[in-house]
Image (tube, coloured by chain):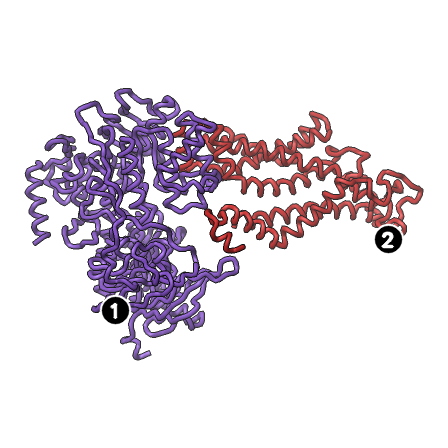
Chain colours: A purple, B red
Amino acid sequence: MSASAFEPALELVDVDVAYKVRGIDRQVLRGVSLTIERGHSYGLVGESGCGKSTAALAIVQYLPRNGRVRAGEIRIAGRDVVSLTRPELRRLRADDVSMVYQNPGSALNPSIRVGAQVAEVFTVRGVKKAEALELARGALVKVQIADPGSVLERYPHQLSGGMQQRVVIAMALAKDPTLLILDEPTTGLDATVEAEVLDLVAGLQAEFQTAVLFISHNLGVIAKMCEQVGVLYAGRLVEEGSVDRVLHEPRHPYTVGLLRCIPRGGARKDHGRLDTIAGFLPNLGEELPGCVFAPRCTLAKEICHTEEPPLHALGGGHVSRCHFHEEAEQLPRVEAAQLELPAIERNFEPLLRFDDLGKVFRQHGHHVHALVGVSAAIWPGEALGLVGESGSGKTTLARTLLGIVGPTSGAVTLDGKALEGRLGQRSADEIRALQIVFQNPDSALNRRHSVRRILRRALRKLAGVSGAAADRGMIDLMHSVRLAERYVSAKPGQLSGGLKQRLAIARAFAGEPQVVVCDEPTSALDVSVQAAILNLLVELQAERRVAYLFISHDLGVVRYISDRIAVLYLGRLMELGPAEVVFDGPHHPYTEALLSAVPTIDGGGRERIKLAGEIPSAAEPPSGCVFHTRCHRKVGEICELEEPPLVEVEGGHLMSCHIPIEELRVLQAGRREAATA
Amino acid sequence: MNAVAAAAPVQPSEARVARRETVAALLRSKTFIAGNLIVGFWVFWAIVGAHLTPHDPLAQTSSVLARPFGHYWLGTDSLGRDVLSRVLAGATSIMKIAPLATLLGVAGGTVVGLVTGYFRGFVDDALGRVIDAILALPLIVIAVTAIVSIGASNATLIVVIGAVFTPLVARTVRAAVLAERDLDYVPAARLRGERAPYIMFVEILPNVLGPIIVEGTVRLGYAIFAVAGLTFLGFGIQPPSPDWSLQIAENYALLAGGSYWWTVLFPGLAVASLVIGVNLVADGLTQVVER
């Protein structure tokens, strides 16, 4: 193995992987070839079901029992892993490869202290126990855990998600592996935490010279983390090249479509609609004689359906598997009629207003202030975006408005009429007026009820129609959310994620609601599906003048759909204003940090603001301005002692900060110039 | 035919495929099949009863305590009644009482479990204490007390066993309901203005049927056990029924001498086989449903 130091860290040659389902082999990876040189980072992107995770599992020979590598070679540091015996495989996993998965909570054993788990990485390699613990401490220091001693003593559930992921990364890197596989490592984390974890991985990679295979559906993350990128579609690598080339001069229609689906660069709903990719991913193991993407490609010609396109080399390592790669960028846009968005008249009474809303939960004898004095209003036809880290009270606010939980203090008024706090005391009309689209349609739709039953019941309860009228109403609703009629007797389990969310939207719109709360409605969906759902929501808004309270952690999505933005932190409103103003600044230091944390495809731009520490506990909020413990613009003692009031700093723009707006303007303009220079 | 299926608008419905897979898995499970064969055998005899037995199970003859494997395959008892006929016909009473008692217990437990799991809070706490109190006492003690005060009859037996099973089933159902009520379809139903009974019985109940069916089968095994035990003690099925436990109770004094074992062994084996059969079915169901 003396030559192994010169071998690439990972080499896949024409790898075919199949899963045996009901007796038939179904191909999941189709002739995938890729190479990662030592110390380099490679990003694998694609929508769910394209085979990204299967590739990762095949590399470490950890496929589920019904999966196998049917053909091709997988070499890690020159060794063919497919032919290794079990003990050899164990050695390989102990010494050369590490994997970090999406959910750190399930990667750690909940009943073993962190210290013992990290030390195990060393003891399996023959290090003595006491020494291993010392090494474990060192490993935690490397991932910038400030207080390794106490973390080692704790159980995983006593750590935050970001901290858990650091521990997992510490374990993965502890053995100085040749190859590190990261499978959606930051998907469940907040933008601010994600940014920290990504910085950490980037730093460590440079230090250890580890080769990284980075799997993500988030092109922004890939742009930030990788040098090379491969685009996977239906198990085939359709395009590959340097991140710069692939993301800015894509030469495969799938890549082009994927990039156009994402609301970015300040795109807004009044600028036009998002592009989508028509159709669906082929079924698992479907035989595709031609190009795998042909059935969904608007450029597809005769040859695409019959002949598998070869890999076209485009120079500089950029390859595309498309017959017409030169035309890829001319992929026709899915143009739809421009919509007449409702004009928002803010001179009248707002549709929904909430004043000084507070919610206190009791938890193990502590009072947790989930909402503290939140006031805002929504006008007809408007979309109010709600952003903030997890735990900032976004969902609590939504649920309090809807009456699912009653407020501890404050009032909600709809059309000038005060609403009861609890759902049970509201009138049928008031219930009908306020509806919600939940984040996860799997959870929001009863899996035992058919589409017909779900919609007819909603129509009966919310619109008061039954019989033949309900059938007509059901068909109308299905048309308006573009859910084909043939699905009427399907159960949610038979629908794809996007269709399920359409059904959930149809249900919310059954009774002509006035305000619809959208609680992260697209975060469980792929980007192409997300684009279609966002388009649908905008269309419904244009048609029916409905108002939205739109919650999302994806700032690009919020910016696209919202007219105004509210920023929450620890249950308090930090900033509220028109979308452009909040995004372009001058903005609250917290908003500034939040925006800087988001990795963008276009890269560059802002330099990230590092927020100190973690979000404080809502049971013991900091004194004064609650953000002062993490604020990068803290001015002094006043921030610790006095809570800044939420005041209108310019027309329609409210902020809660001790720093005057003009000063913020100067400070933040300086940053922006520095970034562009 | 495959081409037609592939072209169908909705792909062969996943729910139906899942159901078919469940059935296929059950049919592949040897435990489940073996259990069903045993239970099926006894169900058959419980239905046909004395009509098909070689002799009348109640008819007394002069050949008292005949040894087995002679003219009477399993011998005769102290009154000269054919043991084989009595064992076969003895399934009738227990196969009526045990399933009915189980059904009552499952129905009661489902309602209590749905209510406690859905409302939580005070109702849950109060009912939880009651359940704990009931569980603290052995089944036989409660049953004997109740039967003595009400008087022994098949109806009493059903009600008493059903009542004792209610809290046990309720606990299982409650746990399943707790997981379901955290799903968003519950607040979604409330946001349509649905009332609690609708949410509990139409929205949640269909989603917790799996554990209820498994629990019901397990309970059936225990119900057979309970009926047999109470009958043996004289609080259950009353003579002259050829019930298995009655046969054991009537004849176990004969065991003392070491002879006449057939009068007790064969009815004992019958009870054991039925309980084992039901438990095999329950195991098979558990493995498939909770996979």
Contact (Cβ within 8 Å) of mark 1 with mark 2: no
Q: Name which quarter of the figure residue A615 lies in.
A: top left
Is B157 situated left or right of A505 in this image?
A: right
Give x and y (percent) for residue A140: 27, 57
Q: Quadrant of residue B187?
A: top left
Q: Please, which residue is most extreme toward the top here?
A: A417
Label of residue A503 in the image: none
Do badges 1 and 2 share one subunit? no
x 48%, y 35%: residue: B204
* x and y, in percent, of residue A457 in the image: 45, 31
A416 w.r.t. A447: above or below: above
Q: CA distance from mark 1 to mark 2?
A: 88 Å
Rate crowding at label 2 as few (under 14), some (14 to 19) or many (20 or more) other CA atoms within 10 Å.
few
Residue depth check, mark 1 versus mark 2: number of the one nearer the observer: 1
| Residue appearing at x 66%, y 30% in the figure | B159
Is B167 left, or right, of A514 in this rendering? Answer: right
Q: Is residue A43 above or below residue A614?
A: below
Query: Which residue is tagged 1?
Result: A313
Element under disc 2: loop
Residue B171 appears anywhere in the view: yes
Name the residue type under label 1.
Ala
Mark 2 highlights which residue?
Answer: B69
**Residue A348 position (above or below residue A542):** above
**Quadrant in the picture for residue A86:** bottom left
- The chain identifier of the residue carrying mark 1 reads A
Direction bottom: furthest residue: A2
Front residue of A453/B19: it is A453
Q: Residue at position x 50%, y 46% from top?
A: B15
Q: Nearer the viewer, residue B98 or A597?
A: A597
The correct choice, above or below, for A7 with respect to B104 in the image is below
Considering depth in this image, is A615 or A396 the residue closer to the camera? A396
| Disc 1 packing (10 Å; few <14; some 14–19; many ≥20) | some
